[in-house]
Image (cartoon, rainbow, N blue to C red):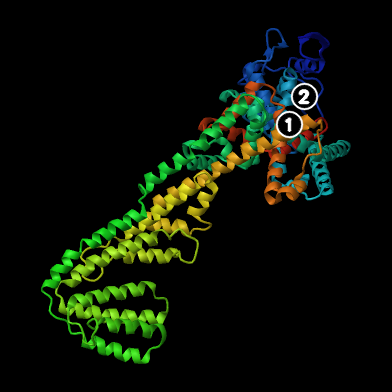
Amino acid sequence: MPVFEIQGPDGKTYEIDAPDENAAVGALGQMVEPGAPRPGGQPQHFEFDPANVPGGIPGYNRQTGVIEGDDALSKVRTASGGVLEGIPVVGPLIRGGVDRAAAATLAQFSDKDYDEVLQTIQSGTEAEKSMNPKLDTAAQVTGAVVGTVPMIAAAPSAFGVAQATRLGKIGGATLGGGGLGGADAFVRSGGDLEKTRDGALWGGGLGAAGTYVAPLVGKGVKKVADALLTGRLAKATGVDKQAFNLLAKGMERDGLDAATVHARLQELGPDGMVLDLGPNLKHQAAALAAMPGEGQQIVRGAIGARDAAANRRIIDEVNSQLGPAPVPRRVSADIEVNQGHLSPRYREVFQNASPVDTRPIAQYLDREIQTLRGEAQRGLSTVRRMLNRVGTEELETNPVTLLETRKAIDGMLETVQETNARNALTTARQAVDDQLRASVPGIKEVDAQYAELARQNTAVQRGQTVLANGREAPRPVELADEFRQGALPQGEQIGPSAVPVRLREGARAEIERIIGTNANDRVALQRLIKGEGDWNRDRLATLFGDDRADRIIRLLDNERSFADTSSIVTRNSESLARREAINDLTGQTGGDFGVVDSFKAGGVGGATRATAVKGVEKVVEALQGVKTEAARKQMAETLTSNNAEVVDALLKAAKGSNLDPSQIDRVSRALLLTTVGGVGR
């Protein structure tokens, strides 16, 4: 530290160690007797014994009479005081208030009066500032920024932050900065108008400059912070920084967040990959698949292996959820065999049957035949002839013949279309059935068993139509009613019916048929089973339960998503590679089909593929910056994985640092306002 020779008021020359001459003069003022009084009545200088005041004057050595080095306590006081003093407008008032409060307290423990103690504290403060000039400047700037940022946040329009137009921003920043700078200069200069004017001019000019500089600074700082974060995350995951940055940008452009990504990966299951999460990630994979090397092999290999396992994956999951698929013809054949087993039961009940009296039935039919016309009349005439003995006009009394008449009516009902004819035949059958009940004890129990088997056979056929899109398919509410009613016993039947089971078997068989005929077209498979709306999902839920229905629909959705990914990655990459090969052969670098030309040649599908290939081309250009084969390999491995840790790291990089550019903007404006000539200085 330099040594200055300073002559004191007593005529003596003193050697003072100090950073500069001003500091030396200040130090001398603490060691000599007071000279001429100041206008306010305070002595100009006075000798001060540090022992009289707790804490003393920092850095002052009584024996050597010099101010010594920058001790830690001195730095703390300089920093804290500088922060307070740097606060715009009110900073000097706060700092002065602190000093006066300290002087009032310390004067009670000293033989000096208040003014002398205050002068001593102020002299010590100046001495500490001279010992730590850089620290004092930094502290005052910090105080100015800390004090200015809340003002900008509280009144953004006054500083040009929230203005709508560029002119409004400049005007607001000029007025706000000028007002703040002028007020601050007025306080610090003790009301000097010239300095107040200069402060206002500096504040206004720097405020206006901030409207251009601050946003750029905010973006720049944000960009640097994001780059540092990306580098750290890339290093932690072992992925090349540039490749990692491209992957993170893909996630950002796809608008992915942590909740969406993890939910999606959970839906896709173990076969899901990072490249399934969004179109930009798919295009990155397609670009890698178009570029020769290990990256291409990894992407194509992963997609190909997943596609090859699709059929087995679908069949295994459907079997797991819905059970093995029955063959409808075999089910119907088994039902018919069981119906045949009832023939001995019918013979048993007819052994105790009495002759039947069909006169009431015949009289009813004769009356109806006289009034009805058309198909209804012809049907009842046929039934009426069945009641006679063959070749005679006499009514048959054998109950077995009446049973066969009922069977014949059932056969007619299966083919009749006209409504009146069906109603007439149904009424005739009911009359025959009532007569059999009265004449053949026990027949209704056997009838109930036969009818139950017939209902089951019908349910098998019905189940095969529930996923159809035509008018024959039931609405979800209709199927739910059929399912509930089908379980109820009918007639003399005891216990619940197996109709719901047969409905499930029919639907399961139809699902198996759809899978078998569309296994290589997962898009069509999903469309046929899931349908376009929610009806098929609701039908499946009625038959198999909500959980199983949801799992089946999720399986089909996932497989369609896998198929879409495969199409984008492999087809687009092949189209791009084919185009490059044509260019190589022809020596052309342009003139390839655009989207319009592709539409003319291939319709909407051609235009869609052309648009997708254009997107892949841009990614290929970006990948040219990934120089090493190892980096492209790492990128391919990441895209074809579903590693949760890597995904989280990519999401963090895509989100970027937590720095808010708007906050940086405000700090930048505050820093500009606190430069030399600005507020707080």
Q: Which of the 4 image quarters holds residue 627? A: top right
Q: How many marks?
A: 2
Mark 2, residues whose alpha carbon is within 10 Å: few (<14), some, or many (≥20)? some
Q: In 3D space, how far apart are the residues under numbered discs 1 and 2 (Cα atoms)?
A: 95 Å
In the image, what residue type sits under mark 2? Pro
Q: Which of the 4 image quarters holds residue 346? A: bottom left
Please tell me which residue lies in front, 324 or 558.
Answer: 324
Q: Earlier in the sequence, mark 1 or mark 2?
A: 2
Residue 108 at least partly seen = no
Residue 373: x, y in percent?
40, 88
**Which residue corresponds to the image point at 20% horizontal and 82% vertical from the top-left?**
396
Residue 101: x, y in percent?
65, 32
**Which residue corresponds to the image point at 42% horizontal and 65% vertical from the top-left?**
477
Please tell me which residue lies in front, 533 or 511.
Answer: 511
Asked if the residue under mark 2 is in contact with the one under mark 1, i.e. CB atoms within 8 Å, the reply is: no
- Most extreme residue toward the front is 391
Q: Nearer the viewer, mark 1 or mark 2?
A: 1
Q: Relative to 177, is 499 on the left or the right? A: left
Residue holding disc 2: 43
Please tell me which residue lies in front, 382 or 181.
Answer: 382
**Which residue corresponds to the image point at 66% horizontal and 17% vertical from the top-left?**
58
Secondary structure at numbered mark 1: helix
Residue 196, placed above or below residue 64: below
Residue holding disc 1: 581
Residue 356 at least partly seen = yes
Which quadrant would the C terminus be assigned to in this image?
top right
Q: Which of the 4 image quarters holds residue 672? A: top right
Secondary structure at numbered mark 2: loop
